[in-house]
Amino acid sequence: MENFNLFIRSIFVDNMIFAYFLGMCSFLAVSKNVKTALGLGVAVTFMLVISLPINYLLNTYILSAGALSWLGPEYADVDLSFLSLIMFIAVIASMTQLVEMAVEKYSPSLYASLGIFLPLIAVNCAILGGSLFMQQRGFDSVWTAVCAGGGWGLGWLLAIVAIAAIRERLETYSNIPRPLRGIGITFILTALMGIAFMSFLGIKI
Amino acid sequence: MAEKINYKSVILNPFSKNNPVIVQVLGICSALAVTAKLEPAIVMGVSVISVLAFSNVIISLLRNTIPTNIRIIVQLVVVAGLVVIVDQLLKAYAYDVSKQLSVFIGLIITNCILMGRLEAFAMANKPWPSFLDGIGNGIGYTIILVIVAFFRELLGSGTLLGYQVIPQSFYDAGYVNNGLMILPPMALIVVGCIIWVHRSINKDLQE
C-alpha cells in the first residue's frame, strides 16, 4: 500500500517536469504532436522502470557506505559512493543503447521520428535525477524503486502528452504573435502548467 | 572533410543565430536550476564552456575509433571524467562557489548541450573546429544564463552578484521583492520572453 501511495505521489506531487523541471530538453523539443510525444514518454517510462531498480541494487550492495560487508567483515568500512554518479550514468547509457537498438530494429518509423532524442534519453535529466533521488531518499526495497520509477515515468509521460495536445490545438485555434510561435509559447505554457502543478505540493495521500 | 569549414562562423553562430539554449533548445534543465542568482550562473557557464570544449576535442580525436553502437557510453565516460576534474578544481581553488554549486556541477553530465554537440559536431569534424564549436556553444549558453540570472536576481532579490542594487528608500516607499521570480517557473517565462525578443529581431527563425 505504501508503494502504491509513492507511485501516485510520484505521478502528481513529485512530477518530474512540473515539480523538479528535469528532462526539459526532450520535453520541449519532441512535444509537437501527441503520437511522437507518447512514443518518447513510453521510452522514458521504460528506462526509468529498468534503470532505477538496477541502480538501487548497485547502490545498496556495492556503492553506499558499508554496502560491501556481505563480502566479509574486513570490507565493512569501504565507501564507494563517490563512484555512484559514474556508475549510474554507465548503467543508464548502456540500457539506452539497448533500447535504441531494439527500437531501430522493430519500429523504424518511431526511430526516424524520435531522431537525435533517442540517444539523448541517456542524458535525459529525469532518468539520472530519478536515480539520484533514489539514493538521496534511501528507498527500502527494490519494489519501492520500481514503483517510484514507474510513477515518475508516467508523470513525465502525462506532462509531455498534455503539452503536445495543447500545442496541437494552439496551431489551429489561436493567434500568437509570430516571434512567439513554436518554442517561445511552449516555454510560457510550461511555466503556467508548472505554477498550476505547484498546487499539488504538500499533499499527502 | 572535403568541405572547407568557416572557423569564424563556427565560433560566432552559437552566440545568436544558432544559440544552444534558445534556438536548439538544449540544456534547459540547468538553465532553470542555477539562474536564481548571478554568481552561480557565471561559474556554471565557465564550467560548461571548459567541459564542452575539451570533451569535443577528445571525442573528435577518438571519432574514427569509437564503434557506433557503444558511442554514447564512450561519450558519457569522457564527459563524466571531465566533470569530475572540474569539480575537483573548483573544490581546490574556489571552495565557496563549489559548495554553492555542488549538485549542479554533477548535473553537467546530463546537460543535453554536451551530448547534442558531441553527436552533431564532434563525431563528424576535426579537433580544432570541434574545440571552437565547444567554446562558441558554451559562450552562447553562458550569455543566456547570465541574462536570465540578471533579471531573476534583480527582480527577485533586489541584488546583483550579492550587492544591493535597489536602494533602501525604495523598500521604505513600499517596494517589495517579487518572490515569484525565485521560483523555477519564472525562469521559463524569462527564457520565453528572451526567445520572443530574439525572434522579433531574427525574422528568419520565426515559425
Image (cartoon, rainbow, N blue to C red):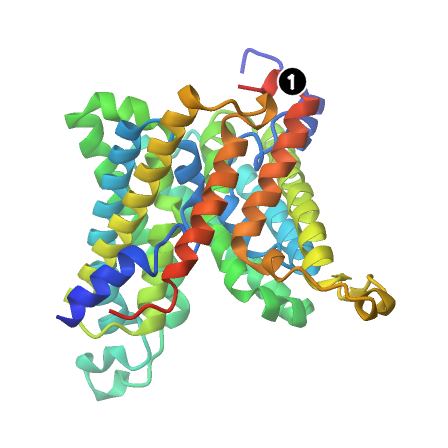
x, y (%) of residue B13? 66, 26
Q: Residues within 10 Å of mark 1 (few under 14, many from 20)?
A: few
Question: In this rendering, is residue A178 above or below B40?
Answer: above
Residue B53 visible from this viewpoint = no
| Disc 1 chain ID | B
Q: Amino acid at mark 1?
A: Lys
x, y (%) of residue B115? 46, 39
Q: Which residue is mark 1?
A: B203
Q: Based on the displayed image, in which of its 4 quarters is residue B16 positioned?
A: top right
Q: Based on the displayed image, in which of its 4 quarters is residue A140 positioned?
A: bottom left
Looking at the image, residue A96 sits to the left or right of residue B45; the answer is left
x, y (%) of residue A78? 33, 80
Local secondary structure at mark 1: helix
Question: In this rendering, is residue B173 above or below A34?
Answer: below
Q: Based on the displayed image, in which of its 4 quarters is residue A63 positioned?
A: bottom left
Q: Nearer the viewer, residue B72 or A117?
A: A117
Question: In this rendering, is residue B2 above or below A57?
Answer: above
Q: Residue at x 58, y 34 (%)?
A: B22
Q: Residue at x 29, y 50 (%)?
A: A155
Q: Residue at x 32, y 28 (%)?
A: A114
Q: Nearer the viewer, residue A182 or B122?
A: A182
Instruction: Identify the residue at the far bottom of this view.
Output: A73
